[in-house]
Image: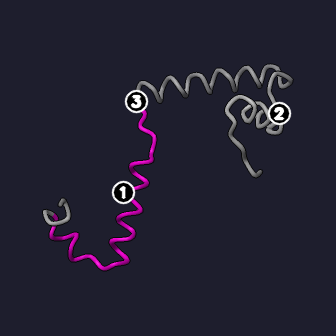
Amino acid sequence: MILETLPDVQKLSQEEKTLMAEELLDDLNAPTVSGDQERAILEVLNERMEAYRQDRDTGSSWTEAKKRLQRETGASWES
C-alpha cells in the first residue's frame, strides 16, 4: 500500500487527508495539455475571436450553441 510508504501522510489529520484526497482527485481529472497543444488551442481561439470581431454576425448565441451541442453530443445543461 502506498500510504505505508508515506509516513508524513499517515500523520495528517482526517481533515487534511480529506483535502489531500480531493486535491489528488482534482489532479487526476485535470486535462493534460502539452505546451504545443496549448499554443495550438490558443491560436485557434485567437483566430475565431478575430473572425468574430470582423463580423459579429458569424457567431452563435449561447442558446443556439447549447442546442447544437446537445443535439450533437446528447449532453445537457441546466443553464
Residue 33 occupies quadrant: top left
Range drawn in magenta: 6-33
Residue annotated with mark 1:
24
| Residue at point 79%, 38% (across, down) | 62
Q: Position of residue 7 (x, y in %)?
A: 15, 70
Left of 61 or right of it: where is 22? left
Q: Nearer the viewer, residue 38 or 27?
A: 27
Tell me: residue 22, above or below residue 52.
below
Tell me: residue 56, above or below residue 62.
above
Given this view, does label 3 or label 1 mark the residue nearer the observer? 1
Q: Position of residue 52 (x, y in %)?
A: 76, 24
| Residue at point 75%, 52% (across, down) | 78
Residue annotated with mark 3:
35
Secondary element at image label 2:
helix
Residue annotated with mark 2:
64
Q: Nearer the viewer, residue 6 or 50?
A: 6
Q: Position of residue 55 (x, y in %)?
A: 82, 20
Main secondary-structure element of the magenta-colored stretch: helix
